[in-house]
Image (tube, helix red, strand yellow):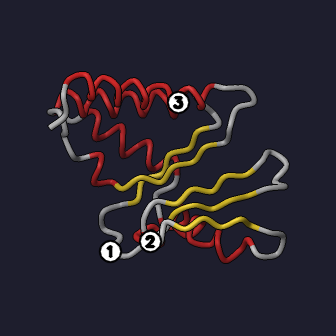
């Protein structure tokens, strides 16, 4: 169990990390999240509703932010090996992939990037489109 001060510190750190979404130049950010997290009322139903509303507000007000939902009925998908991150410079000169089952770090070189990026693209291709995802989140947020 966390002490109240620890909880406050974790929440503050998480809120500070959100600042990156509003910096200049704006980063292009895309997330694929499991549908199951949209059902889990950690902290209670009211907290979940607030979280869904915050997520919808973020997607609607930040044109550089995309959220896609991986439906629960997908028994197998490219993201099952764990979280992955693709980080690139604006010019694309440097790219790095971090994550997957081995929690590996790959420095992508010209011509070698496709195998490392394929699971990321596969995950997005298997998820709902950004519009379908927003519609699903809206329906869930509207539930009593």
| Mark 2, other Cα within 10 Å: few <14 / some 14–19 / many ≥20 | few
Please tell me whether residue 94 is drawn above or below residue 76 in the rendered image: above
Looking at the image, tell me whether mark 1 or mark 2 is earlier in sequence order: 1
Label 1 or label 2, whichever lies nearer to me, is 2
Q: Earlier in the sequence, mark 3 or mark 2?
A: 3
Q: Which label is found at residue 75?
A: 1
Query: Which image quadrant is residue 98 in?
Result: bottom right
Residue 139's x, y, as percent? 31, 40
Looking at the rendered structure, the secondary structure element under dot 1 is: loop
Question: In this view of the protein, which residue sits in the foreground, 118 or 71?
Answer: 118
Residue at image point 71% right, 65% down: 107
Q: Are there few (<14), some (14-19), or many (20+) residues within 10 Å of tag 1?
A: few
The answer to whether mark 1 and mark 2 are in CB contact below 8 A is: no
Q: Secondary structure at mark 2?
A: loop
Instruction: Say left or right for 131 vs 112.
Output: left
Q: In the depicted view, which residue is nearer to us: 130 or 113?
A: 113
Residue drawn at 27 percent across, 54 percent down = 36
Where on the picture, by quarter, is residue 144? top left
Q: Which residue is mark 2?
A: 101
Q: Nearer the viewer, residue 44 or 72?
A: 44
Q: Are marks 3 and 1 in contact (CB under 8 Å)?
A: no
The front one of 49 and 18 is 18
Residue bearing the label numbered 3: 60
Neighbours of disc 3 within 10 Å: few (<14), some (14-19), many (20+): few
Asked whether disc 3 touches disc 2, contact meaning CB atoms under 8 Å apart, the reply is: no
Tell me the mark number nearer the camera, choosing from 3 and 2: 2
Instruction: Name above or below for residue 31 compared with residue 4.
Output: below
For marks 3 and 2, give the CA distance: 32 Å
Q: CA distance from mark 1 to mark 2?
A: 17 Å
Q: Secondary structure at mark 3?
A: helix
Q: Quadrant of the N terminus?
A: top left
């Amino acid at each position: 169990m966390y002490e109240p001060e620890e909880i406050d510190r974790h929440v503050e750190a998480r809120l500070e990390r959100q600042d990156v979404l509003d910096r200049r130049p704006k980063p292009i950010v895309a997330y694929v999240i499991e549908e199951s997290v949209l059902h889990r009322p950690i902290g209670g139903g009211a907290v979940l509703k607030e979280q869904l509303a915050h997520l919808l507000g973020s997607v609607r007000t930040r044109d550089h932010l995309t959220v896609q939902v991986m439906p629960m009925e997908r028994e197998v998908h490219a993201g099952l090996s764990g979280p992955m991150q693709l980080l690139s410079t604006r010019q694309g000169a440097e790219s790095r992939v971090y994550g997957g089952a081995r929690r590996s770090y790959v420095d992508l070189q010209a011509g070698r990037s496709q195998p490392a990026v394929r699971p990321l693209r596969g995950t997005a291709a298997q998820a709902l489109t950004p519009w379908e995802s927003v519609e699903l989140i809206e329906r869930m947020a509207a539930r009593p």
